[in-house]
Amino acid sequence: MKFVRWLADIDRRIIFVVIAVAVVVPLLFPLGMRVKVTPQTQTIYDEVENLPGGSNVLVSFDYDPAAAPEVHPMALAFLHHCFQKKHRVIIMALWPQGAQMAVSAMAEINRDFDLEYGRDYVNLGYKPGGAIVIKSLGNSFAEIFPKDMAGRSTATLPLMEDVSNLYDVDLVMDLSAGVPGITEWVIIANALFQTRTAAGCTAVSAPQFFPYLQTGQLIGLLGGLKGAAEYETVTAYAGKASPRMDSQSVAHVVIIVFILFANISYFILRRKREEGSGGPTARPPTSA
């Protein structure tokens, strides 16, 4: 009974400490909990796997540092898979900070591969305009991106010699945290130019893009940290999403346990109070 009363009156600071431990420990010592791969993740993997070596993959970094904890891990896993399959990657951004996020991603990817800039990948940088930019890419990359992010003429880059417009792109992968982003790529790159399109986004925005999956306008969708962890799982890439999912899962279990204990202790104490007072409080008689 004392334990039940202690649970009912537990100091909230103890709860905070337990939650903190549940979050931090799996980050320091990953549990290796397996993440189930959903069909919308598997289809992106299959698409990259089945493309012929040397295919042109366009990756648009349409997110900023605020969305990086969810979206950046999927960018790393996807890029790693593309280069593993010897595909050529064209990087661009419709968000101002997206191009720099791509620089950060490629700095990490280059540790695992001996990539040659201009031949294996290019970073075209940021271009304002959203949907207008995408539509213009259907006509000419050179007109929209005469120079890359570092100021080099794109006409001198071997990779871009074979890429005139979106019709020369085998797959678009949009990594998005808002607008402009997935919707613009779907309704223009896919619907207008028939370019196969996949996407990754934050977990909170993923449900609104499910209709595109059902219509086939998106071949696949990575949703939030779980989507990133799924792609790491299916590609066997040792990224940061899977350990973070361990932390998230353990923290959720701890929260559920606290909720169960709180409810159990409440009902036990209420029953004891009712027994001590001779039963439930009687209602006053009503006058006729």
Image: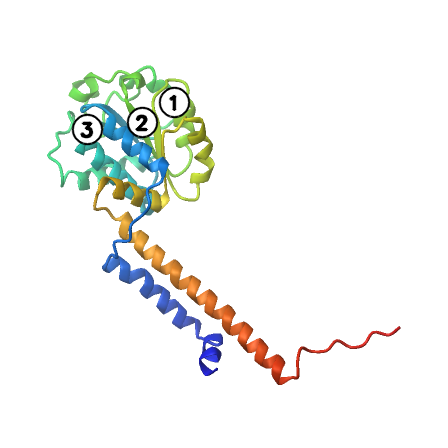
Mark yes or no: residue 106 visible. Answer: yes
Q: What residue does disc 2 label? A: 172
Near mark 2 (Cα within 10 A), the count class, few <14, some 14-19 or many ≥20, is many
The residue located at (44%, 34%) in the rendering is: 209
Q: CA distance from mark 3 to mark 1?
A: 22 Å
Q: Quadrant of the C terminus?
A: bottom right
**Callout 2 secondary element:** strand
Do the CB atoms of the residues marked 1 and 2 lie less than 8 Å apart?
A: yes
**Callout 3 secondary element:** strand
Label ID, residue 28:
none
**Callout 1 secondary element:** helix
N-term-proximal mark, 3 vs 1: 3
Near mark 3 (Cα within 10 A), the count class, few <14, some 14-19 or many ≥20, is many
The residue located at (44%, 40%) in the rendering is: 205
Provide residue 206's location: percent of width, then percent of height: 42, 39
Res. 42 image quadrant: top left
* Type of amino acid under label 3: Tyr
**Number of dots carrying numbers:** 3
Res. 87 image quadrant: top left
Provide residue 86's location: percent of width, then percent of height: 17, 28
Q: Is residue 84 left or right of residue 140?
A: left
Q: What residue does disc 3 label? A: 121
Q: What residue does disc 1 label? A: 190
Give the vertical position of 94 relative to 24 (above or below): above
Say which of marks 3 and 2 sits in front.
2
Say which of marks 3 and 1 sits in front.
1
Mark yes or no: residue 157 visible. Answer: no
